[in-house]
Image: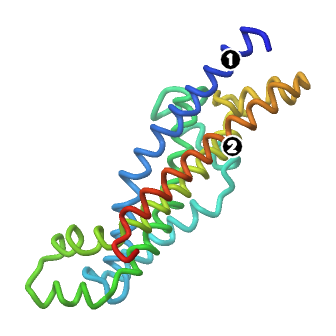
């Protein structure tokens, strides 16, 4: 393998990590509050608001229904408005985030709903406020599920980043497309696949270990 290709592989790894890193932080910052809003405003929630819950849930469902490739193309004007370009790492962060936020929000919502209702009622009977219940009951009890769900979201982001790479976002996906598909360079294609497998396995292993460590019921 030539030094040029090795340099491109290193650049692809760095670009992929930048894309996933930036998108995942934004997804966590938006998706988790969104999941809390869905749980709190649902029927029987600590802030029951059916209209709000239905409206937010509908938006989440609509965005989740659009395949990533179509969503990325449809968001090009919005992406350019936000980051000034629709290509490269910056151009991929916006659609990756838009696609991942509702996905993670729904997974986190399931984990939050599994929190024992008795714990919430006990906190309410002791006069705890809504914010106190969220911070000291819901989030601590749902942490293992939220971490496991965020790990799944990260793996989905890696898959999506490969798709984004094929249409100019850079990263390992772009490298696989240009060298593996357009130039029929099997060595580069196999190397990219191995790197992606290692990346996914590392994230999954770390996520599983963290979720297990946070599980108080083990």
Pair 2/1: label in front: 2
Hey, which residue is sitting farthest right in the picture? 184
Circle number at residue 8? 1
**Nearest the eye: 96 or 196:** 196
Q: Residues within 10 Å of mark 2 (few under 14, many from 20)?
A: few
Measured along the vertical axis of the image, is residue 11 above or below residue 95? above
| Quadrant including the C terminus | bottom left
Residue 8 in picture, x, y percent from top left? 68, 17
Residue at the spot 42% in from the left edge and 57% down from the top edge: 210
Q: Are marks 2 and 1 in contact (CB under 8 Å)?
A: no
Q: Residues within 10 Å of mark 1 (few under 14, many from 20)?
A: some
The CA span between labels 2 and 1 is 18 Å
- Quadrant of res 117: bottom left
In the image, is 13 to the left or to the right of 175? Answer: left
**Nearest the eye: 109 or 47:** 109
| Quadrant including the N terminus | top right
Residue at the spot 41% in from the left edge and 81% down from the top edge: 114
For mark 2, what is the residue?
Answer: 197
- Quadrant of res 3: top right
């Amino acid at each position: 393998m030539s030094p040029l290709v090795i340099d491109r592989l290193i650049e692809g790894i760095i670009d992929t990590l930048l894309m996933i890193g930036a998108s995942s932080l934004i997804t966590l910052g938006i998706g988790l509050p969104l999941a809390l809003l869905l749980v709190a405003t649902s029927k029987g929630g600590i802030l029951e608001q059916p209209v709000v819950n239905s409206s937010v849930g509908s938006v989440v469902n609509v965005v989740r229904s659009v395949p990533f490739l179509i969503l990325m193309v449809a968001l090009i004007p919005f992406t350019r408005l936000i980051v000034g370009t629709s290509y490269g790492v910056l151009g991929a962060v916006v659609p990756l985030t838009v696609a991942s936020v509702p996905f993670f929000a729904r997974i986190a919502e399931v984990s939050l709903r599994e929190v024992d209702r008795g714990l919430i009622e006990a906190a309410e009977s002791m006069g705890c406020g809504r914010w106190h219940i969220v911070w000291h009951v819901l989030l601590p009890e749902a942490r293992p599920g939220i971490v496991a769900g965020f790990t799944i979201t990260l793996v989905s982001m890696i898959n999506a980043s490969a798709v984004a790479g094929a249409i100019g976002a850079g990263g390992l996906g772009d490298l696989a497309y240009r060298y593996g598909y357009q130039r029929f360079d099997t060595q580069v294609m196999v190397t990219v696949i191995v790197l992606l497998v290692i990346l996914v396995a590392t994230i999954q292993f770390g996520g599983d270990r963290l979720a297990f460590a946070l599980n108080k019921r083990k």
